[in-house]
Amino acid sequence: MKWGIKSSMEKFLPWFIPILLIGGWQFLSWTGAIPERILPAPSQIIQAGFDLTVTGELYDHMSISLWRALAGFLIGGIIGFLFGLLNGVFRFADLFFDTSIQMLRNIPHLALIPLVILWFGIGETSKIFLVALGVLFPVYINTYHGIKTVDKKLIEMGKAYGLRGKELFFHVILPGAMSSILVGIRFSLGVMWLTLIVAETISAQSGIGYMAMNAREFMQMDVIVLSIIIYALFGKLSDMIARYFEGRLLRWNN
Amino acid sequence: MKPFGQQGINVSMKKVEKNYEDREVLKGLDLQIREGEFVAIVGKSGCGKSTLLRLVAGLEKVNGGSIELDGGPLKGLNKQARMMFQDGRLLPWKRVIDNVRLGLPSHMKNKAIQALTQVGLKDRVEDYPSKLSGGQKQRVALARALVHDPALLLLDEPLGALDALTRLEMQALIESLWKQRKFTSILVTHDVEEAVVISDRVILIENGKVSLNQPIHLPRPRQRTNPAFSMYVDEILSRILNRKNNKNYSMVVNKESESLFNSINN
Ligand SMILES: Nc1ncnc2c1ncn2[C@@H]1O[C@H](COP(=O)(O)OP(=O)(O)O)[C@@H](O)[C@H]1O
Ligand SMILES: [Mg+2]
């Protein structure tokens, strides 16, 4: 009995402050203490979300944003992962590529936006390119580092037990690098959303960032705040998915 | 390949040299081990015991001299040998059963379960290594080594990190599996008592060479309380520590004292 109370307390307690804040916010908006043109009430934001859902606009913007995020993430993530593996495993590739990649990594990818717009215009390519570029480096660095720091003693053991090449890679090296690779992926998810927000805000004709910028022109505060909240939810969702896979892939770790 | 019916293998090291950069670790080491023999190697830390095992396992190449297995030169990885390490080296991301199956053809799962049964861990096959105690991990490592039916078992301080009671248990387990399967065995240990209790012969490595080659003539199972037992231990220890307390110190126990030991023992 006591335990039951404790566990439901544990479930509820983290939500206490958010609920209080939103309740307080709604109350203050209602009394007029928070003017509508500074911050709309939660109920107005929900209303805006509902209206945009009915017209189908919200769905269109959300799906185009998700598509850009996913495409950029996959392209950048796969390239970063493959280079990380290649340079981590093969000494020649390491010598050949690593220094150049480390140099490129020091360029803040968002600084490339003007150049990217000139290259690709403001179409899909420019946004996917920027996201891919932002995602590539954290995935690369962590994959590379993970492979380089696999316990040498385990590799020696694997060899002593007759593992070579592909077997050694899949049984020992890749699993040994996995926790570092996953750190890279989680970090890159943050970079992915950040890059997309900036790119969509500066140069786009669709997507959540565009929806926010467009709303600014018409002073639609509720839509702006809605966009921010949607980004936050996207970020939270992708982090939860990443954590889920982390839990599954690193099950042995606890 | 070993002749039919032979379970162990003869190992012959002749003038083996090994250096890392300009540090000479082994400087012309000679050592012959008969098939089925249990040899213990002792020596100060850093004297090259692990290096010797890695050479015999074929994980590294000699810089000079030769290693022969049943008369044939060792080339590349020694496929007839299996090694057990002090730190176990289980793959933490594999369940116990999959650790034991490492490098084994997939249809041989039953053999892995058999091996785990032999070391008394049949009920832990599905656990991850992080759930096991130190002693249990070493049992898994032992099962993993034995599942390949090695002709040569190389043990690199496998019990060094275990508590005293678990060690005794493991020593008995290793000895009984060795008696049963008759593989050749090389045990590196820093515990002289362990060397004397389990081996046919204790080898001391000093300055890159074998400096003591001491057969242990005590009936098995050996009793630590036996005075002859402590004499062996004392002599080997004082030899390691270079205690020149004995004037005509020939540390090799001669035939007379041997029979004396045995008469005390019986
Ligand atoms: N891979 C290596 N590279 C360089 N030096 C090594 C290497 N392996 C061992 N050594 C050196 O060789 C000597 C013997 O090491 P080792 O065989 O591990 O000693 P032991 O097992 O007897 O304690 C030590 O001085 C050690 O530093
Ligand atoms: Mg050692």
Image (cartoon, rainbow, N blue to C red):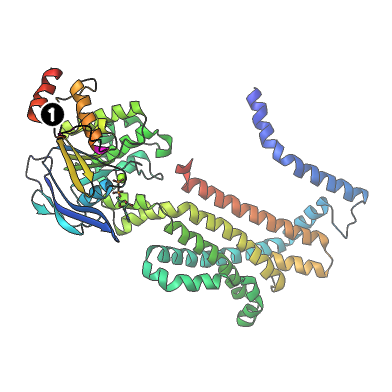
Q: Quadrant of the N terminus of chain A?
A: top right
Q: Main secondary structure of the magenta part?
A: loop
* Residue at the extreme bottom: A118
Left or right: residue B15 compared with residue A46: left
On the image, the x and y values in percent for residue B25 come to: 26, 53
**Residue A31 at x, y percent in the picture:** 92, 48
Q: Amino acid at mark 1?
A: His
Question: Is residue B257 magenta-colored?
Answer: no
The residue sitting at the front extreme is B247
Q: Is residue A71 above or below residue A7?
A: below
Along the line of sight, which residue is nearer the eye, B58 or A245?
B58
Residue A10 seen by the camera: yes
Q: Is residue B120 visible?
A: no
Depth check, front residue: A103 or A74 = A103
In the image, is A174 to the left or to the right of A223?
left
Decide if ligand 1 comes within 8 Å of the CB at mark 1. Answer: no
Asked if B154 appears above or below A194 in the picture, the reply is above
Residue furthest out toward the right: A32
Looking at the rendered structure, the secondary structure element under dot 1 is: loop
What residue does disc 1 label? Answer: B217
Q: Quadrant of residue B19?
A: bottom left
Image coordinates for residue B190, horizontal then vertical, percent: 29, 37
Q: Is residue A80 above or below residue B120?
A: below
The residues colored magenta run B240-248
Q: Which chain is disc 1 placed on?
A: B
Q: Residue at x 38, y 36 (%)?
A: B126
Residue B245 lies in magenta, yes or no?
yes
Q: Nearer the viewer, residue B22 or A84?
A: B22
B74 relative to A118, above or below: above
